[in-house]
Amino acid sequence: MAKVYVLTSGKGGVGKTTLTANLGTAMALGGERVALIDADIGLKNLDVVMGLENRIVYTLIDVANDKVGVFDALVRHKQIKNLSLLPASQIATKEMVSPEDMKKIIEEMKERFDYIFIDCPAGIERGFRNAVAGADEALVVTTPELPAITDADRVIGLLENMGFQDDKIHLIVNRFKPHMVRHGDMLNIEDIKSALSIDVIGIVPDSEEIIISTNKGIPLVLSDGNSESVMHKVLEDIVKRLKGEDVPVPKLSELEEKKGFLEILKSIFGRRRSGDD
Ligand SMILES: Nc1ncnc2c1ncn2[C@@H]1O[C@H](COP(=O)(O)OP(=O)(O)OP(=O)(O)O)[C@@H](O)[C@H]1O
Ligand SMILES: [Mg+2]
């Protein structure tokens, strides 16, 4: 039975779709059977980020309307056979699907996958309620800026009211820029942690690599020449934590004062690799 994660944020544009694509792809590359669900009906872009937009025949709306079965609507990834996408429709509206529809669809999918990642739309209205309805755990994405953190806090409150226990809600801090923290222009991880008081499962640096790969429709974790990159490692480590492996999140509180984030990670991963030899 699949474990189902929803990536949500409240505030728009913080990286939900990018992280859904990359975490799902990294998980599938590890051999797990993975499905991605684009719950951003009306705007949809997970298909584009995955490079699968030309393969779509049916969408989530067709499944919700009983036009086709869910397994007929799933689009399989070109290279990774154990990775599929349930696409959203661009011409539909979020009101055309209900949280009950989502629960039913996900229950059916759970039997054939190990992990399901749901890409939630921005906001806290119907689209949010649809996206979280069938999820077991939530990955709340924020950037280190006050408006994003305030919205993340609101979303965490809503998730708790909807019955998510605290240990089922995890935070991903995306687009982290250590030099801004050093100059006092950005909140550091400890500030964010104490503001939101949930467990931080990943800190993802701001990176041009990810923008370049997104524009090519190839998730970064699948791009050639990136397998040794720090970004790749950061994403893989989040996937390991999602699988329950004990991979500590690097402690940045003191280090980020002294060094750049990428340097710290390089030194940590360098040490680990040489330690394995
Ligand atoms: N770590 C990162 N470093 C640099 N750019 C990033 C990073 N993560 C995401 N981005 C960029 O930020 C923009 C928004 O990302 P994305 O579309 O994933 O956000 P979203 O939360 O899904 O937005 P929406 O709420 O509109 O659905 C994109 O241009 C993406 O390439
Ligand atoms: Mg999105």
Image: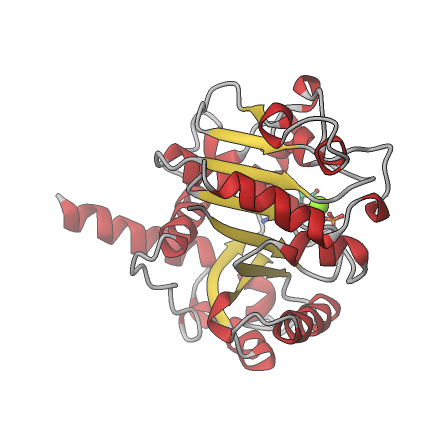
Residue 17, given in percent of the width and then of the height, sits at 65, 44
Residue 259, given in percent of the width and then of the height, sits at 43, 63
Specify the quadrant of the image occupied by residue 171.
bottom right
Quadrant of the drawing holding the C terminus:
top left
The residue at the point 23 percent across, 53 percent down is 271
The outermost residue toward the left is 277
Please tell me in which quarter of the rendered image ligand 2 is found: top right
In-front residue for pair 190/56 = 56
Number of marks present in the image shown: 0
The residue at the point 85 percent across, 37 percent down is 92
Q: In this view, does 1 lie to the left or right of 130?
A: left
Q: Is residue 222 left or right of residue 237?
A: right
Q: Is residue 250 left or right of residue 180?
A: left
The outermost residue toward the front is 66
Camera sees residue 176 = no
From this view, report whether residue 205 is shown above or below residue 218.
Answer: below
Residue 44, given in percent of the width and then of the height, sits at 75, 37
In-front residue for pair 175/217 = 217
Specify the quadrant of the image occupied by residue 30.
top left
The residue at the point 68 percent across, 32 percent down is 87
Camera sees residue 215 = yes
Residue 135, given in percent of the width and then of the height, sits at 57, 55
From this view, report whether residue 107 is shown above or below residue 267.
Answer: above
The residue at the point 60 percent across, 71 percent down is 183
From this view, report whether residue 203 is shown above or below residue 256.
Answer: above
